[in-house]
Image (tube, rainbow, N blue to C red):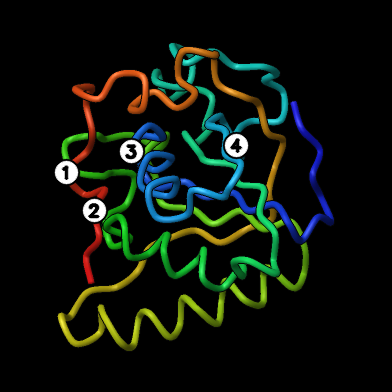
Amino acid sequence: MADDSGKDNVATFAAGCFWGVEHIFNKHFPQLKTSVGYSNGKEDITNPSYRQVCSGSTEFAEALRIEFDPSNVTYAQLVEHFYRTHDPTTKDRQGNDRGTQYRSGIYTHSDEQLRIAKEVTERIQKEHFTPKGEKIVTEIQPAGTWYDAEEYHQKYLDQNPMGYQCPTHRLHW
C-alpha cells in the first residue's frame, strides 16, 4: 500500500489491462519508475488480489503508478500520453477486456494535478474526439488507496514479450 497524497511527482492512470499500460509508458518514457496495481476501489477491501479485482466485486481499477521527475517529463505530457494510448470513450472496457477494473481513470495526487488533468482532457476532447462525434468517459478523481499488484504482474510484458496485450494500447495519434 502506498500513500502518495500531495505528491506532484506521482501519477496514477487506469486504462485497461495494466500490463499494456505499463509497457507503452515505459517504451516511450524509459526514465519513469512504474508499478502496476489496484486503485480507487471499495474502502473496506484491503490488499486485494488479482483474482478479487478481476471478479469486479472490489471496484478497484487495474492501474499504473508512475514516479517521475517533472524536470524531465511534465504531468501534462503524461496525461496526454495516457489519452494517446487507449480508448477513453468506452466505459469499463478496453478492446475485449470488460469490467469496472478496465475503466479509464486519472487519479490525481494534488489540486494542481486535478487542474492539469481537466485542462488536458478538455483539449484532447476538442482536438481528437469531438470531430469524430465521440465523448471521453474517463473518470478524473483523487487517487484512492493504492495496492501493488502481485510481483509476477510487474513489467509483465518485458518478462513475457509474447504475453497478452490489449490492441488499444498503441499510439492513436
- Relative depth, front residue between 11 and 142: 11
Residue 170 horizontal/vertical position (percent): 24, 53
Mark 1 element type: loop
Q: Are marks 1 and 2 in contact (CB under 8 Å)?
A: yes
Residue tagged 3: 20
Which dot marks residue 37? none
Kind of residue sitting beneath label 3:
Gly
* Distance (Cα) linking label 3 and label 4: 17 Å
The answer to whether 132 appears left or right of 169 in the picture is left
The answer to whether 129 appears left or right of 114 in the picture is left
Which dot marks residue 167? 1
Front position among marks 3 and 4: 3
Which corner quadrant holds the C terminus? bottom left
Which corner quadrant holds the N terminus? top right
* Distance (Cα) linking label 4 and label 2: 23 Å
Which dot marks residue 170? 2
Mark 1 neighbour density, 10 Å: few (under 14) some (14–19) many (20 or more): few
* Distance (Cα) linking label 1 and label 2: 7 Å
